[in-house]
Amino acid sequence: MPIATAMAGVNMRLNAGGIREMHWHLTAEWGYTIAGSCRVNAVDQLGRNYLADVYPGDLWYFPKGIPHSIQGLNDTADGCEFLLVLDDGTFSEDSTFLLTDWMAHVPKEVLAKNFRVNTSAFDHIPDRQLWMLPSVVPTQNVAEANPVSPAGIAPLPFTFAASKAPATNTTGGTVKIVDSRTFNISQTIALGEVTVVPGGIRELHWHPTQPEWSYFLEGNARVTVFASSGNARTFDYQAGDVGYVPPSFGHYVENIGNTTLKYLEIFKTDVYEDISLNQWLALTPPDMVKAHLQLSDETISQLQKVKPVIVGPGEW
């Protein structure tokens, strides 16, 4: 997706017990749990550790360089599926720093000296990266399984139970915003989780400074993007599709299916921002709006000074 220069995405699944190998990145990693449950762990640069279980709709965020891993659980399903977003559009899995890959490229004598054990302790380490590996499902809960660190637990949680956070209800669906104001450690990724009822639309709007990287979870959508100078294009999406809207490009998202549309609006920023066309017009002097659009006084009186966000179907 050449246009997506700000962010990259990965859809990944782990069987119950399966592990995404211990690793770290040059970029920050933001995760959204799509199905099932998984256990994530991390250790920060001060030796403070963190362990947590996440469920559908929950998030995690690991700043760049922070080592972490992910393991599938079986308390709600056989493993898990999740979406990863990296805050660099040029991200490649080939540039991930993997534990086994590094250990395989260090002489055993150096490993022995580093860990203060005999070289024979490393006779059976893998000779290449594992990337993913099978294992048993943890039987201990988080409190029991997390080693006690002399430095304590990481002060800012690396996960956020967004599934339990309240959504804002509108006439046409719901919206849930999660950014650094609520998920404090997430300094480079902000989220809008949106649902739209059949026939409803995510209102005409734009995002002033950041591109929108969209992931469609459920239903069918139609998006028209306005790029100025008479240039506009319309795209249809279904579950599993990815969309990308450059900064300040006007657009809307319409539910063209018979079931609820659910999708994610993801941004490389610390604070979610959007500008509503409806609100902009409502808060502009009426004569100015009328001069541009030749709207009647009655129509202008119906403009919304509070963002509608999602508009339900109907006739007016």
Image: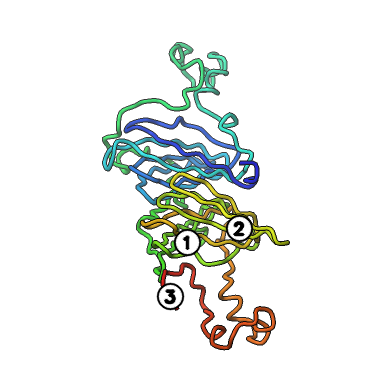
Q: Is residue 214 above or below residue 42?
A: below
Please state the horizontal and vertical placement of residue 139, each as a whole percent of the image: 26, 35
Q: Name which residue type carries label 2.
A: Val
Please state the horizontal and vertical placement of residue 286, each as a whole percent of the image: 63, 86
Q: Is residue 108 above or below residue 309?
A: above
In the image, taking residue 181 as reference, residue 275 lies left or right, namely: right
Q: Nearer the viewer, mark 2 or mark 3?
A: 3
Give the residue displayed 44% in from the left and 59% down from the top: 255
Front-most of 133 and 240? 240
- Dot 2 or dot 3: first in sequence order is 2
Query: Badges 2 and 3: C-beta atoms under 8 Å apart?
Result: no
- Dot 1 or dot 2: first in sequence order is 1
Occupied quadrant, residue 94:
top right
In the image, taking residue 30 as reference, residue 18 lies left or right, namely: left
Alpha carbon separation for disc pair 1 and 2: 22 Å
Give the residue displayed 44% in from the left and 61% down from the top: 176
Q: Name which residue type carries label 3.
A: Glu
The residue carrying mark 3 is 315
- Dot 1 or dot 3: first in sequence order is 1
Front-most of 238 and 139? 238
Sort mark 3 into few (<14), some (14-19) or many (20+) by Cα contacts within 10 Å: few
Please state the horizontal and vertical placement of residue 72, each as a whole percent of the image: 35, 36
Occupied quadrant, residue 121:
top left
Placement of the N terminus among the 4 image quadrants: top right
Give the residue displayed 42% in from the left and 43% down from the top: 50
Local SS, label 3 = loop
The residue carrying mark 2 is 225
